[in-house]
Image (tube, helix red, strand yellow):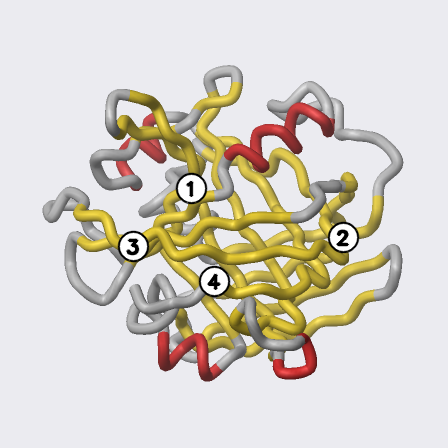
């Protein structure tokens, strides 16, 4: 990858998390990955992130650009150089940025599908509707800030969930060529998460019975991050199992 270190601000990041029967992510992730489990559950979800002032690290912030993005993710582990690594496998990325779309898997890691994002939010309420131009993905989320962590989550506390997602900062996305994944790692200057209560959630990915048969997946929790200085570091390409079907 030719991507320089990119710097900017995570203006808003919502992580919408689903727990699932571990047999399902085992089938959905290519080797060398295996699902990373939480109390016996596989953990998947959607990252809905608005980036601001994004630019190469050596540029001043006035040259940065803003984009809305969605990434469907599955938490994974794999073995590398004699140790266990962890991160996320990203079968699909969507964006409203034509630059990300055109440069995806060329200058930017991962194929980015062009999508329309309709967003309405204030300091406590969040509504997001994303529909891809190829009709391959649709996400609708209505949420508001919560005071407490949900009792039914696979994570015991917000702090446990926060540590889990902080450790999974390296994402591997489907690229242009069969069997190739593009790596991108997130670095943040601070890490702060707030619990969200979801009033409504729809996802064509998680609602697809061919990928997630009835009874194998259910909503787990949602988390919000705001105003986070960060950098993106390219991690090159990985060759995965050529027999695995990448979207």
In space, the residues marked 1 and 2 are separated at their CA atoms by 24 Å
Which mark is nearer the camera, 4 or 3?
Answer: 4
Q: Nearer the viewer, residue 29 or 168?
A: 168
Q: Classify residue 153 as left or right of residue 145.
A: left
Q: Which numbered disc flags the more N-terminal residue, 3 or 1?
A: 1
Q: Which mark is residue 88?
A: 1
Instruction: Say whether disc 3 or disc 2 marks the residue closer to the N-terminus.
Output: 2
Q: Secondary structure at mark 4?
A: loop
Q: Quadrant of residue 66?
A: bottom right
On the image, numbered disc 2 is attached to which residue? 143
Which circle marks residue 5 in the picture?
A: 4
Along the polypeptide, which appears first: circle 1 or circle 2?
1
Q: CA distance from mark 2 to mark 4?
A: 32 Å
Identify the image quadrant of the N terminus.
bottom left
Of tags 2 and 4, which is closer to the observer?
4
Residue that carries the numbered disc 3 in the rendered image: 236
Q: Report the quarter where the C terminus lies.
A: bottom left
Q: Residue at x 23, y 67 (%)?
A: 176
Please give the name of the residue rendered at 42% of the width and 66% of the height, measured from the top-left corner: 4
Whichever of callouts 2 and 4 sits on the residue coming sooner in the sequence is 4
Secondary structure under badge 2? strand
């Amino acid at each position: 990858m030719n991507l320089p270190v990119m710097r900017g601000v995570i203006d808003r990041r919502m992580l919408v998390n689903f727990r699932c029967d571990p047999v399902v992510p085992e089938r959905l992730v290519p080797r060398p990955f295996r699902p990373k489990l939480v109390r016996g559950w596989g953990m998947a979800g959607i990252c809905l992130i608005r980036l601001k002032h994004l630019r190469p690290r050596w540029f001043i912030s006035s040259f940065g650009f803003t984009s809305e993005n969605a990434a469907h993710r599955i938490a994974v582990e794999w073995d590398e150089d004699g140790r266990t690594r962890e991160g996320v496998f990203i079968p699909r990325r969507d964006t409203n940025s034509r630059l990300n779309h055109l440069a995806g898997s060329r200058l930017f890691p991962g194929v980015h599908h062009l999508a329309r994002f309709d967003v309405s939010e204030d300091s406590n309420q969040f509504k997001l509707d994303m529909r891809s131009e190829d009709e391959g993905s649709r996400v609708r989320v209505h949420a508001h800030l919560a005071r407490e962590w949900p009792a039914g989550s696979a994570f015991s506390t917000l702090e446990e969930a926060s540590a889990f997602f902080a450790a999974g900062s390296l994402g591997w996305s489907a690229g242009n060529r069969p069997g190739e994944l593009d790596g991108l790692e997130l670095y943040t200057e601070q890490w702060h998460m707030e619990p969200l209560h979801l009033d409504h959630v729809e996802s064509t990915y998680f609602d697809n019975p061919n990928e997630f048969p009835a009874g194998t997946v259910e909503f787990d929790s949602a988390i919000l991050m705001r105003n986070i200085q960060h950098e993106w570091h390219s991690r090159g390409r990985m060759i995965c199992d050529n027999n695995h079907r990448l979207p």
